Amino acid sequence: MKQKSKLWSSILLGACIISTGLCSGCGSSEEEILMGRYAEREVKLPGTAFTYMHPMADGSYYLYGDEVALTQVSADGESGESVWSWENNSDIHIKNSFAVSDSGAVIFGYTPKFYSDEEYEEFAEDGEYRYLYYYVDETGKENQLALYGSDYETAENLEYFAFAPDGRLYAASSSMVYRIHAENGEAESLFHTNGQVNEFAFLGDTMIALDHEKAYLYDTAGDKLLEDNSVLNEFVTSHQITGKSIVLAVAEENKDMTKVSDTGTINTDGSDDKTAGADSDGDGSDSPILYFGCRTGLYRYIWGGSVIEQIADGRLLSFGNSQYKPLAMQALSGGEFRVLFSGGHMVELYYDETLPARPSKELTVYSLEENGRIRYAGQLFQQEHPDVIVNYETGMDGDSAVSKEDALKNLNTRLLAGEGPDVIVLDGVDMEQYAEKGVLKPLDDFIAPYAEEGTLYQNIAEGMRMTEEEKIYGIPMTVYLPIWLSEKQYLEGEKSLNDIVAGMERARTDHPEGPLLFTPYPQDLLNQMIPACLPAWTDENGDLNVEKLTEFYTAMERLWELDSAGLDEAAREKWQQDVAEVHEIEDDRDMLMATLGQYEDHQDIGEAWAQFGCLLNSWYDLKNVSATKDIFANGWNSKKTEDEIMFSKYAGQAENVYWARTVTGLCEQAKEPELAEEFLTLLLSDRIADKWWLEGQWYGGITIRKDSLEKAMDQNNHEFAEVRGWDAAAISMMYSDSQWFSEADKQWLYQMMEEADCRYLSGTMLEEVVKEAGLQVLEGSLTPEEGAAEVARRMEIEMQE
Amino acid sequence: MKCRNNPNGIHRNRGKRHGRNSIAENRRLLFLLPGLTGVMIFYLLPFLEVVRRSFVKAGNNSFVGLDNYKAVLHNAAFRLAVRNTALYIVLGVPLLMGISLVLALLLRRITARRKLLSALLLPMAVPAAVMVLVLQLLVDKHGLLNGVISELLSRTAGMSAFYGIDYLNSDGALAVVLCSFLWKNTGYMVILWLAGLSALPRDVEEAAEVDGANRWQRWQYITMPELSGSFFTIGMLSVLHIFKSYREVWMVAGSYPQENIYFLQHLLQNWYLKLEFDQMAVLTVLLSGILLIVCLFLQKHLEQGKEA
């Protein structure tokens, strides 16, 4: 019996050893590195406002944008700007849709410019109006197109036009696709759609039209809707996320195009073709190919096939960059592609056989919320390090419903498991806690060379010292500075929170009607005031100063009373509704228009805070000057145009406060520590800072790089310095003369940057508790003393923990 | 006779029986093996890892001996949470068991109790979010309770403005939480008690009644001892429900509620967000130890009761 057992044991042991050996053998064999993948090169465009590309079969293309002329670019990149008379037609106000044909015919929908209220009312009865359409044929003959058709009469506006290669014109409303007969204006209904078609492609006589959930196939020769293609529909459903997310390109002949082999590599010579398409003989030369570009990458579909294959990973290309939205794609010879993205970003995709198919290293960058600067830096880092894949993760994806607390728990779980990121953006994260727990790597050595060279505002970096060791664990890329904008007489010489209250008291006496601050909700007031006061509420040991907090609540209570005294409840409610409506708008243009409209309604109020570090302002009674949140220069220049208006540095309860933004640290447990440091170096480089300042993407605060700030201030960019306002009848927007900063202005800003040494980090527990209790104070449920006591009580447990 | 012919026969038979038993035992173990393996892999091994972490510093994993335990035991928030949780259990469990038992005894005598039972179970079906909303509507500073008091005061004492109390931020917060806990769980416990009561032998009780035992004596000497099994089960379930009621407390009062309703779960939750993994490990080990001791004590007590 025992012998039997021993025998079985030996057999089992032997089997284990053999299988282990075999398994280990699998891993020990030399790993074959697959080579070849798509890379991209940027195409420099003359401006950033191009929003439309019409690709042509010979590789040339047309470019167009609202504020740039229609431009034809040859296949080798030579561009020639064509000036069309319609571009200077002063009656055309806003173009809503645009298309150009291979032969140069143009069509667009537009809304006209109105010169009086009556004109507008006549045009937009009950607020509903139909676009007007303008057509220019290939000979240059222009005329307004009066469309008609049996189904068209009751249809909605045509939002999308496309010319087929044969010159025929198609258009789509939100529920119908039409063929437009430009010669007589007939809109011939072709088929109904479930949503707005936003992309057309033409493959021979077949038109492919994409809406948000399916691909409609239409035989333009036989004039009939073809049977659904489930492969295409499935792809569209899963990749058309919001609005237009997919671009299409067609290659009629397959022979030059790429082939994906069974090993996942792509060949450009047509060999080793084992595609899952309909190409039965395997040479890939029979069927045309449809290419899809979307957030997740580049895909191809061999016409009639059963699968759509991914041929490029979006994360390694601009497709994966959430800042860019694909607008149009062109298939070129040799398996190359040209893609136009939003923001005037154009790239050419080419297949590089020298690059490994999958990068061998991975750099993980984490932030709680999407951060454009980090996304852009990741993209740049990726381009410069082909052997690295930058995996940018956000804890609270905009599409998901993950709360901040859940996101932090997920992050902590990863850290606990040793699977933390390499680089971490600490906005909204309790940085001090992470530093104390050894999650973050001290950056003192990293920052030392910058200090020696004087590249950064060192006072800002020094202000980030924390924990008992007094080390730097995170560096902000930008800062906001608390600045007030108000009438001189009310806030000149302001030195404390009480001065602000006193100033507003005077303002209320002078102006009994209307609100004083641009704070529709009570939380807006708290949000504006907390940054410049919060650092004063705790001492060196982290103990809460209840007296200071009571003083803060007392001031807030009084400011809210003063603000509410000039605005009845109904008016405030209306104002809040307007704000809510603006926030619900997703489209940028509509958002801008609605925001401006809102300021028109409340133009004697002012606005909350400007992006350029103006944390706070009281823009009282600044008539006829609109202020959008993203136009810093408006406010700035209003100083020039309105003598009584002034900017002033805001000293709340704390002095020299800066709001640290995009605070970035390195994880102690980083798997790629050297790459992480390189990434941080890139983030702090002038290439990133300048990009944000010199190319118009200047939201997000003031750079902490001295040279970049100086470059920005010296650029004398009138485009930024434009002042927008409403004309007397508040009908059209007007643009006044622009002025750039004076030397005194610049020095004022530099000095503030030099003095800023008191950090404010948002999203701390204290801030949340103060806001919660503060709302009760402003609503009258708690007195300032009770509010402060409530904060103290809750913070006591937090401190004890 | 077999014994005479083979005096060792008995022993041999015994040996065979013993062998058969051991085979059966081994088979039982074999059947248990998958389950035990699962418990080992998914519970015991992770728990051992938690025990290990309770002796190391979070972050750098350096061994710190009992420092983490000392830190936790000296932590004021921990002591507050332990005190509140203990008080909640000490008050909540007996109250829940007592009230539900009394209701069960009353319902036992009602013939048409089925309809009432359904009504009693309704609070269990109410989603936590709804319950929280109802609770806020009731006990908020501007809630229904204060509204009623305000109305009463204005009618009786002529007081026109009564701003009331924010009960969840007052010393009465624990009472509010206790009431909501009782409201939600009493019905279910009544069902359990009724199940236990229905299993009691009626004839014994009737015989005692014939013998002249009064109601209290019958309760003391027949019903109570017979209900000891149900008592243990319902007691354990009550403790579990008390721990589960944290969800509602958190939803209604957040991570930092009034200090009387700051429980151990709040502490664990907040420590997790603050990366206090070492202290969390200590707390888990301590809690597990306490629960183990309580379970063993109750089990032993129950076995002794059965033997008696």
Image: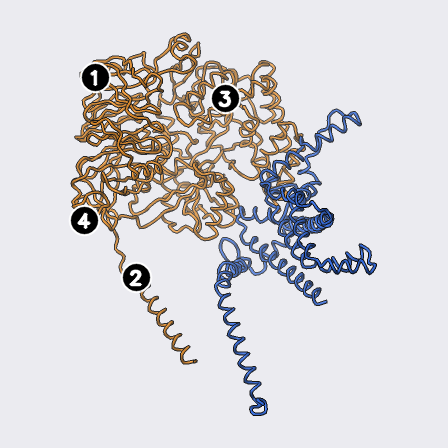
Chain colours: A orange, B blue
Chain for mark 2? A
Indicate which disc, 3 or 2, sits on the residue closer to the N terminus.
2
Indicate which disc, 4 or 3, sits on the residue closer to the N terminus.
4
Give the mark toward the camera: 4 or 2.
4
Chain for mark 4? A
The CA span between labels 4 and 3 is 61 Å
The CA span between labels 4 and 2 is 26 Å
The image quadrant where one finds the C terminus of chain B is bottom right
Chain for mark 3? A
Amino acid type, callout 4 = Asp
Amino acid type, callout 3 = Asp
Cβ–Cβ under 8 Å for marks 3 and 1:
no
The CA span between labels 1 and 2 is 66 Å
Amino acid type, callout 2 = Cys
How crowded is the residue under tag 1: few (<14 C-alpha within 10 Å), some, or many (20+)?
some
Same chain for marks 3 and 2? yes
The residue tagged 4 is A272
Q: Residue at x 80, y 55 (%)?
A: B216
Q: Secondary structure at mark 3?
A: helix
Left or right for A246, reference A754: left
Q: Quadrant of residue A308?
A: top left
How crowded is the residue under tag 2: few (<14 C-alpha within 10 Å), some, or many (20+)?
few
Give the mark toward the camera: 1 or 2.
1
Q: Using the image, tell me which numbered label, if any, was put on residue A26.
A: 2
